[in-house]
Image: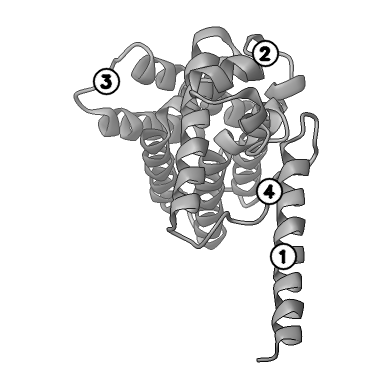
Amino acid sequence: MSNSATRSSAAKNDGRARAEGADEVRAAAPGSSRVPTRRPGRAGGKRDTNRRERTEALHKAAIGLFLERGVENVTVDEIARAAGTAKGNFYRYAADKRELVAALVAPLAETFSEAFARCDTRIHAAKSTSELTPAFMTLAMELFQGVQAHEQIVLLWLQESRAPAVGARVPIAEFNRDITAKTIGLTEFAHEHGLLRKIPAAVSALAVVGAVERLLIAYLRDEMFADNPAGVVQSLVMLVMEGITG
């Protein structure tokens, strides 16, 4: 390759590197509405690994502080300090505290959404009341597996869901509304097809949601039912189904 071609190639590479660097600098600025979309370095490489570790450290620090003092009472400064990093580094991984909360809730929301979608398919295929119980039982067990995989996020959801839906709490409120809407939707379909008693769908669905929330608090916070939590889930489903299908 000629010297001129080599210089041209080097200049292009340097230009791309500067552009990528500028992207990260802009993303790190407080109040920025965007975060870096490029993975720093190759997948599994040192820079990528470092980024994952820093993200995990921020998430772990945030969850601990949020559960201790509430989402709105914790500052970005405090999260960064607890994670062992500078405040400026926080903005490499989240545009603000609200975006951080959304990232924390996302895995639980995805798990629950997928479980509800599978249940929706099973209920649409149900031809009789007797086919509803296994559909709801499977949903309950899948949701419980999600709870076990994300216990601290579930505690955060239970803690913050009844507080005003403002600021960094908004993603939690949105998740709560989505779960409630999905629960009512499943109940409404069963009502429309004559598979449940003529109790208003919202009443029976919200009664179930309330019971589930109280049992989760007892299990996760008060450490009840540790010897057989799956049995508690099954008992609740049977109790509910006997009440709304009889």
| Residue 36: mark in rendering | 4
Residue 168: quarter of image: top right
Give the CA separation, mark 2 to mark 1: 43 Å
Mark 3 or 1: the one toward you: 1
Q: In which quarter of the image is the N terminus?
A: bottom right
Q: Which of 14 and 55 is in front in this view?
A: 14
Q: What secondary structure is marked by label 2?
A: helix
Which of the two labelled residues, at mark 3 and mark 1, occupies the earlier sequence position?
1
Within 10 angstroms of label 3, few (less than 14), some, or many (20 or more) residues? some
Q: Which residue is at 70% across, 28% downward? A: 98
In the rendered image, the vertical position of residue 30 relative to residue 53, given as above or below: above
Q: Mark 2 points at which residue?
A: 72
Q: Which residue is at 54% across, 26% downward? A: 85
Evaluate whether residue 25 shows in this view.
yes
Q: Name the residue under label 1.
A: 14
Compared across the picture, whether 194 is left or right of 214 comes to right
Q: What secondary structure is marked by label 4?
A: loop
Q: What secondary structure is marked by label 1?
A: helix
The amino acid on which the numbered mark 4 sits, given as a three-letter code, is Pro
Residue 31: quarter of image: top right
Within 10 angstroms of label 2, few (less than 14), some, or many (20 or more) residues? some
Q: What secondary structure is marked by label 3?
A: loop
Give the CA separation, mark 3 to mark 2: 31 Å
| Residue 225: mark in rendering | 3
The amino acid on which the numbered mark 2 sits, given as a three-letter code, is Glu
Q: Nearer the viewer, residue 37 or 29?
A: 29
Within 10 angstroms of label 4, few (less than 14), some, or many (20 or more) residues? some
Give the CA separation, mark 2 to mark 4: 25 Å
The amino acid on which the numbered mark 3 sits, given as a three-letter code, is Phe
The amino acid on which the numbered mark 1 sits, given as a three-letter code, is Asp
Q: Nearer the viewer, residue 112 or 68?
A: 68
